[in-house]
Amino acid sequence: MSKPKSGGSGGSQPDSSSGQKIEASKLWIHCGRCYALYVDKKVKLFFLACNHVLCEKCVKVKSGRTPSDSNIFVCCTCQKNSHGREINNDMPNYVKRFFHTEAFQLASEAIDKFQLSNHRHFDKYKERKEIEMNKLAKDIALAKSVCEKRFKDFNMMRVERKKLSQRTKLIKEEAAKQKAEMERMAQAKLNRTLESQKSSSSARDTIHGRPHVRGGSQVGSRRSSKDSGRGTQAKRPKVTSFHHLPNHSFNL
Ligand SMILES: [Zn+2]
Ligand SMILES: [Zn+2]
């Protein structure tokens, strides 16, 4: 098999900028099934005799060899058994020209047709990807806005919570103050009541105690002691009752 060394008409020595141009002009060379790109150099691409391009992952190799001892491939695009060649710089020129970067110079209808159909195929793929990207970008923008809104809400709630906790603290302090004030007032009232009870009781003692001091009688003394024994019960209205004198039994 003849293997011309040169890269054909596209094989002039490129400088870096024209090199990039050439790389860009090869972007359309892709696997017809999974869209792996030739310029990525991640997988080998094969150009089949049925004019389809497939990568090594997508092409099937049929058992058996061609008379020229090369692989027989099964094209998954058109299901034909085909000869095929790996796309690289070592392809014979008659095959390599299908991938010429300036195919218009060759004026070959077959090559124009091949490149055009590959361009279209790849353009459709790019359109689909662009739609997917736009949809993703929209989804991302929506998710971003939702996140921003939630973050804003969260911050507002945090501020609100801080305000509420400050308010709760103030209310608690106010309630404690009021409670203390109420306790103080209740204590003052109790003190006043006790004070007034004490003063009224001492005043009564003074009134009841006078006859005892003056008369010195037994009855007075007993009553006085009785009264003092009753203590605070002496607040009742005064009722005249029998004097219980010492019991002398006798027959009437
Ligand atoms: Zn593939
Ligand atoms: Zn095919």
Image (cartoon, helix red, strand yellow):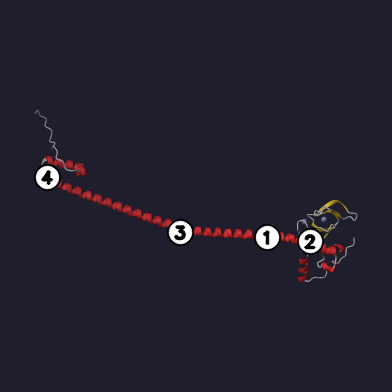
Which residue occupies the foreground of this view, 244 or 236? 236
Which residue occupies the foreground of this view, 123 or 222? 123
Q: Is residue 102 above or below residue 78?
A: below
Three-letter code, disc 3: Lys
Q: Which mark is residue 133?
A: 1
Kindly indicate the quadrant of the structure image that contains residue 148.
Answer: bottom right
Three-letter code, disc 2: Asn
Residue 1 image point, x, y percent: 90, 60
Q: CA distance from mark 4 to mark 3?
A: 73 Å
Residue 193 in sight in this render: yes
Q: CA distance from mark 4 to mark 1?
A: 116 Å
Three-letter code, disc 1: Met
Q: Which mark is residue 163?
A: 3
Circle 3 SS class? helix
Q: Which residue is mark 4?
A: 211
Q: CA distance from mark 1 to mark 3?
A: 44 Å
Q: Which residue is mark 2?
A: 118
